């Protein structure tokens, strides 16, 4: 299983803060998982298709080609600003 976490605006758009999905070879990279999730419908495509979306795997910022493994935690969030 992969544990997915959604934060801030992404959480609000999807109406959920977490989801567990089975790990599969079809979604073995960050990019493939993102594509797979966007196929769930228009609200998923809008929330996860933002060009500035940040993704972290096991609390480290991830790149699209990064591999996912069984048990990974994947977080989706908009850019964070501070002052």
Image (cartoon, rainbow, N blue to C red):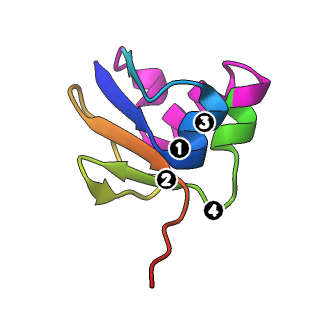
Rendering coords of residue 24 (x, y %): 38, 19
Tell me the crowding category of disc 3: few under 14, some 14 to 19, or many 20 or more residues within 10 angstroms, Cα based: few
Q: Secondary structure at mark 1?
A: helix
Rendering coords of residue 41 (x, y %): 74, 20
Q: Which mark is residue 31?
A: 1
Indicate yes or no whether the magenta region holds residue 41. Answer: yes
Rendering coords of residue 3 (x, y %): 31, 27
Mark-to-mark CA distance, 2 and 3: 23 Å
- The residue shown at (52%, 47%) is 8
Mark-to-mark CA distance, 1 and 3: 22 Å
| Mark 1 vs 3, N-terminal side | 3
- 24 to the left or right of 76: left
Q: Is residue 32 above or below residue 52?
A: above
Mark-to-mark CA distance, 1 and 4: 14 Å
Q: Nearer the viewer, mark 1 or mark 3?
A: 3
Mark-to-mark CA distance, 3 and 4: 16 Å
| Residue 51 or residue 12, whichever sits in front | 12
- 22 to the left or right of 17: left
- The residue shown at (45%, 85%) is 83
Task: Write down the quadrant of residue 53 in the picture.
Answer: bottom right
- The residue shown at (55%, 56%) is 78
Mark-to-mark CA distance, 2 and 4: 13 Å
| Mark 2 vs 1, N-terminal side | 1
| Mark 3 vs 4, N-terminal side | 3
Q: Which residues are magenta?
A: 22-43
Tell me the crowding category of disc 4: few under 14, some 14 to 19, or many 20 or more residues within 10 angstroms, Cα based: few
Q: Which mark is residue 52?
A: 4
Q: Secondary structure at mark 2?
A: loop
């Amino acid at each position: 299983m992969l544990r997915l976490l959604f934060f801030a605006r992404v959480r609000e758009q999807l109406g959920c803060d977490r989801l567990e999905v089975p790990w599969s070879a079809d979604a073995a990279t960050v990019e493939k998982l993102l594509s797979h999730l966007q196929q769930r419908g228009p609200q998923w495509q809008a929330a996860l298709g933002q060009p500035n979306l940040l993704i972290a795997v096991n609390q480290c910022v991830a790149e699209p080609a990064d591999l996912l493994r069984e048990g990974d935690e994947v977080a989706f969030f908009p850019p964070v600003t501070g002052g």
